[in-house]
Image: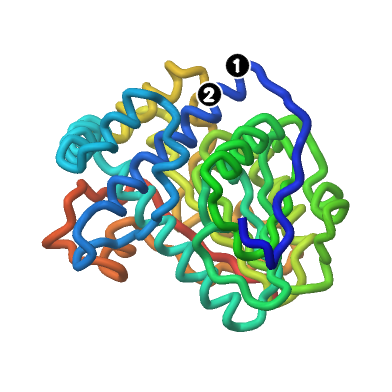
Amino acid sequence: MNAESPGPETLPAQGGKGAEKDSSTAEMCALIRSVESRRPEKGRILDDPFAHHFIQDRKYRLMFSWRMFAMSAARAYDALFSGWAAEIILRYRHSDELIRRAVESGCTQVVILGAGYDSTALRSPGGAGTVYYEVDKPDIQRKKQEIIQQNSLPIGPSVKYVSCDFEAGDDLLTSLVERGFDPAKPSFVSWLGVTYYLTEASVRATLQKLDTACAPGSRIVFDYILPSVVEGTIGHSGALRGTKFAAKRGEPFAFGVEGSRLDHILPENGGLRMAQNHTVPQLLEMYGDPKDFWLAVSDFIGVVELERT
């Protein structure tokens, strides 16, 4: 832990089956990021040297210990669930780039919604006074802090943990303000790997809260899936297997939207506007070589950036 900046504050212990599911999902994302980070630097899209610390499952840790075994396991996963692993890597790379630009432009508030085992606060730039607000359920936040402390991971910028359950109706803005967030200052919000597990009402309510919480000049990035993925009608085997797998785990996909209709879920008469909307193949064109990428890339997932005007 960096002595120059305050460390994370400890949250009370809470657990339950929901926490185990959230941890499992977060761990799988960490595993995919870790495998990508072990690829040769020349063709690497995402560099996350901290991801492997969040792999707690013994069989997953065994996979990571041998690079070739890890690559083989990841390719097997990609063969079954084609499109999902590539999206995880590219959405984080895109978010990293947007955060870097925001911080360089003077943004001092970065909010990570549904943070899970996200390592953004560990590896992203932190200018003077930059604060990272990690928003998630308290049980997974507690586990994350334990992992950080056990591995003596360096925390550069100040990190504040904000307990909030979207589906339970917790007030996001109130929770942020209580931890020191200033709605009058521009901020950057990263909301990845979350919206498709929420109801449309929850997605709209969260965007409404962000519209209120974010000052002009703020940016928000989030990913989404198509309605046909949620409905199970898409003609893509990897997407369909992902839908069935999520349902089997008790976390069915609940929300999807066409990229052309994203404007319809934004708050009416609000200040949020579309800035960018990219499919995963488009992100690969931006950050990698489509001819040399090792994972299957599909366009049933998109990553959108909003601006608060």
Pick the front one: 156 or 160: 156
Mark 2 burial class by Cα count in 10 Å: few <14, some 14-19, many 20+: some
Say what amino acid the circle numbered 2 marks: Lys
Q: How is the image coloured?
A: rainbow
Local crowd size for mark 1, using a 10 Å CA cut-off: few (<14), some (14–19), many (≥20): few
Q: Residue at x 73, y 45 (%)?
A: 205
Which dot marks residue 60? none
Quarter of the rendering occupied by the C terminus: bottom right
Left or right for 5, reference 241: right
Q: Is residue 236 visible?
A: no
Residue 129: image location, x then y, percent = 73, 73
User: Residue at the spot x=19%, y=41% of the render?
Assistant: 71
**Residue appearing at x 26%, y 32% in the figure:** 63
Q: Residue furthest left?
A: 291
Q: Amino acid at mark 1?
A: Lys
Residue 231 seen in this snapshot: yes
Q: Position of residue 124 (x, y in %)?
A: 52, 65
Q: Residue at x 75, y 40 (%)?
A: 10
Left or right of 121? Residue 257 is left
Is residue 163 placed above or below 232 in the rendered structure? below
Residue pushed farthest bottom? 105
As helix, strand or loop, the secondary structure at mark 2 comes to helix
Residue tagged 1: 17
In this rendering, the answer to whether 100 lies above or below 83 is below
As helix, strand or loop, the secondary structure at mark 1 comes to: helix
- Separation (CA) of disc 2 from disc 1: 6 Å
Q: Are marks 2 and 1 in contact (CB under 8 Å)?
A: yes
Image coords of residue 141 (percent x, y):
65, 38
Point out which mark residue 21 bears. Answer: 2
Image quadrant where residue 70 sits? top left
Q: Quadrant of residue 307?
A: bottom right
